[in-house]
Image (cartoon, helix red, strand yellow):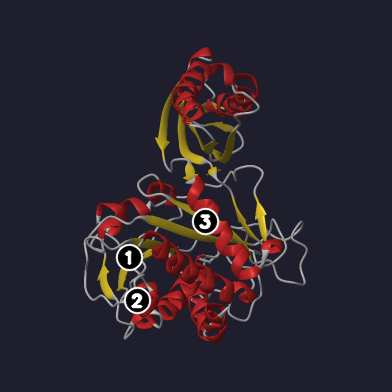
Amino acid sequence: MALLDDARAVAGDVADLRHRLHQEPEIGLDLPRTQEKVLQSLDGLGYEITTGTDTTSVTAVLRGTGRTDGTRSTGADAHRPVVLLRGDMDALPVQEKTGMPFASRVDGAMHACGHDLHTAMLTGAAGVLAGRRDQLAGDVVLMFQPGEEGFDGADVMLKEGVLDAAGRRADAAYGLHVMSSMADGGTLMSRAGSSMSSSDALLVTVHGAGGHGSAPFAAKDPVTVAAEMVMALQAMVTRQFDVFDPVVVTVGVLRAGTRRNVIPETARLEATIRSFSTEAKARLKSSVPQLLEAVAAGHGLTATVDYIEEYPLTVTDGAETRFARSVVEELFGPERHQELAHPLAGSEDFSRVLAEVPGSFLFLSAVPASADHATAAYNHSPYALFDDAVLADGVALYSRLAVDRLAALA
C-alpha cells in the first residue's frame, strides 16, 4: 500500500504531464515535442537513457540496487533479471470534439486512444521506481514508443535493441492500455492467450475504361465492380470462415469519379482486416486477392490488390497474465479485475514484444464516473474521454509489476 501511496502522491504531476501531452499531440514515428517532455520528466532520476535513431523513441534503464538476500548491487549484472514496461506515445489524425479545457491545440490531431495517459503513467512510475531502487532485485527497462497507430513503432524499437537495453534480454514485459468505454472506470481487464486480433491492410484499385454516364455499355465501369467487391468481401466472411474463428473485414475508403455523369477509369477501396488465429490470417492473405481479382475479371476489368500484413496476433503468456492479475487484486482488490471472455478486435504492435518475451497486456477503463460505459464514446472517437482519476492506478500498477516480478525472478 505504501507504493500505492507513492503513486497517489505524484498523481498531480502525472495529470499535468498528461494534459500537456494531450494539448500537443504528435502522429507517427517522429514525436520531437513528446520526446522532449518525456526526457524532461526523467531528468535527474538516475536512468540510463538512449533515444532512437530511426524514431523519436526513449529507452530508459534503471539499475536496481536491491538483492533478495538483503545485500546491495550496483551496475549491470549478466545474472540479474530484467523487466520491461512499455508506454506508447503517439496520437491519431482525429479532430478533437470533447470540449475539454486541455483539448488538442493541433488541428487534425488528437490523443483519441489514450496514449497520453500511458506516457504520463509510465513517467510517473519512473519516479516511483527511482525512489525504490534499493527494492529492485534487478533492472527495469522503460520503453517509450512512438508510432503504435499504424507505424509499427514497436518493430523499429526492437530492431534498435530495446529488449536488450539492460545488457541482457528482458525476462518479462508488460503493457497497459486505457479504454474510454467497455467497463466502469477503474476496472482492470486481462486475458491469457489470444487477447487482441492481428491486423492487415487491403488496398485495391479497380481498373476500367472511362466513358459517358449515359452509355455505360461503351465503357468499363469500375464503380459497380468496386461496389460488388465490398459486398463480396462480406459474403466471404460469413461463407468461408468459421464463425468460431471469426474475421472482420471493414471497408473504410471507397472512392471514384469526379462528376455524376462521367464513368471514371478507376475506383479505389481500402479496408482493414482482423483475424484471431494464424490459420485464418494465412487464409485471408490468399483468399482475399483471389476473390477480388475474380470479381473484376468476371466483368472484364482488372484489379491491383495489395494485401499488407501489419500487426500479428497479441498473445499473452498464461503465467505472466496470472501474475499480473494477482498484482491487480493485491493492489486494488479482486473486485477491480475482470477477465475478458473474448479477445478484442483491436490490434497492437506490443504483440511483437510479446512474441519475443513472455509477458502480458492489460486494459484499464478510464471512463469518467459520470458516464455510462455502455454508451461512452469508444477509443479513436473525436468524443473519447479518459478520466485522470485512473492515472495513479496506472502508475502503481506499472511500478508494482516491476518490483514484484523482479523479486520473483531473482
Horizontally, is 365 left or right of 29 in the view? right
- Residue pictured at 61% horizontal, 76% vertical: 388
Q: Which sits in the foreground, 261 or 148?
A: 148
- Disc 3/disc 1 C-alpha distance (Å): 28 Å
Q: Amino acid at mark 3?
A: Phe
Looking at numbered disc 2 in the image, what kind of residue is underneath it? Answer: Gly
- The residue under label 3 is 323
- Pick whichever, 270 or 402, lies toward us: 402
Please give the name of the residue rendered at 35% of the width and 62% of the height, measured from the top-left corner: 410
Marks 2 and 1 sit apart, C-alpha to C-alpha, by 35 Å
Circle 2: is it few (<14), some (14-19), or many (20+) Cα within 10 Å?
Answer: few
- The quadrant holding residue 39 is bottom left
Under tag 1, what secondary structure?
Answer: loop
Q: CA distance from mark 3 to mark 2?
A: 24 Å
- Mark 3 vs mark 2: in front: 2
Q: Residues within 10 Å of mark 1 (few under 14, many from 20)?
A: many
Q: Helix, strand or loop at disc 3?
A: helix
Which residue position holds label 2?
70
* Coordinates of residue 356 in the picture (x, y in percent): 35, 46
- Asked if residue 143 is positioned above or below residue 23 in the image, the reply reads above
Most extreme residue toward the front, as rendered? 69
Q: Residues within 10 Å of mark 3 (few under 14, many from 20)?
A: some
Relative vertical location of residue 154 with respect to residue 293 in this rendering, above or below: below
